Image (cartoon, rainbow, N blue to C red):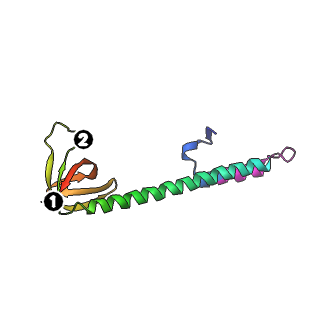
Amino acid sequence: MAAISGVSQQSMGKDEFLKLFTTQARMQDPMNPVQSSDFLAQLAQFSSLEQMSNLNTSFEKMLSSQQTLEAGQFLGKAVIYQDPSDESATPGQGYVTGVKLTDSGPVLLVGNTQVPLSWVSSMYDL
């Protein structure tokens, strides 16, 4: 299914699928109906995709919670960090005084610098 009424396959949601499904059922040729097994296969595919989407959402929430817990463990610790986009710069270091929650994940507050967790190369107590 490449495109139906200007709706691409990637953007077709549950509501669009159900509208298409019911329209297909209503508009079928009574002399040559679609096999019920075809309808069931379509519903099973849709159900599987919806469950995978729900599972993906659950995993994203779990990962976000795990990252937040991990970031909390950095509070009061000294860290060394490096901006991966500027490898020639001297690595930064300092104490983590806070954690900021952003849309892209938790960010450590090191002095006046906001440091994403992925930049941290080491953590230690002093």
Q: Is residue 81 depicted above or below 54 in this figure?
A: above
Can residue 72 be seen by looking at this rendering? yes
Total marks shown come to 2
Q: Residue 30: image x %, image y %?
A: 85, 48
Q: Residue 78: image x %, image y %?
A: 16, 57
Crowdedness of circle 2 by 10 Å Cα count: few (<14), some, many (20+)?
A: few
Q: CA distance from mark 2 to mark 1?
A: 24 Å
- Residue drawn where x is 21% and y is 51% of the image: 122
- Residue drawn where x is 60% and y is 54% of the image: 14
Can residue 23 be seen by looking at this rendering? no
Between tags 2 and 1, which lies in front?
1
Task: Give me the disc on residue 125.
Answer: 1
- Residue drawn where x is 49% and y is 54% of the image: 56
Q: Helix, strand, or loop for circle 2? A: loop
Q: Is residue 7 depicted above or below 123 in this figure?
A: above
Kindly indicate the quadrant of the structure image that contains residue 8.
Answer: top right
Task: Give me the disc on residue 78.
Answer: none
Q: From the viewer's perspective, is 96 left or right of 66?
A: left
Q: Helix, strand, or loop for circle 1? A: loop
Crowdedness of circle 1 by 10 Å Cα count: few (<14), some, many (20+)?
A: few
Whichever of labels 2 and 1 marks the residue nearer the N terminus, that label is 2
Q: Does the segment drawn in magenta span residue 29?
A: yes
Q: Which amino acid is tagged 2? A: Pro
- Residue drawn where x is 62% and y is 42% of the image: 5
Task: Give the labeled residue for mark 2.
Answer: 84
Q: Residue 104: image x %, image y %?
A: 33, 53
Most extreme residue toward the front, as rendered?
A: 125
Q: Which range is magenta?
A: 18-34
Q: Are marks 2 and 1 in contact (CB under 8 Å)?
A: no
Q: Which amino acid is tagged 1? A: Asp
Q: Does the segment drawn in magenta span residue 27?
A: yes
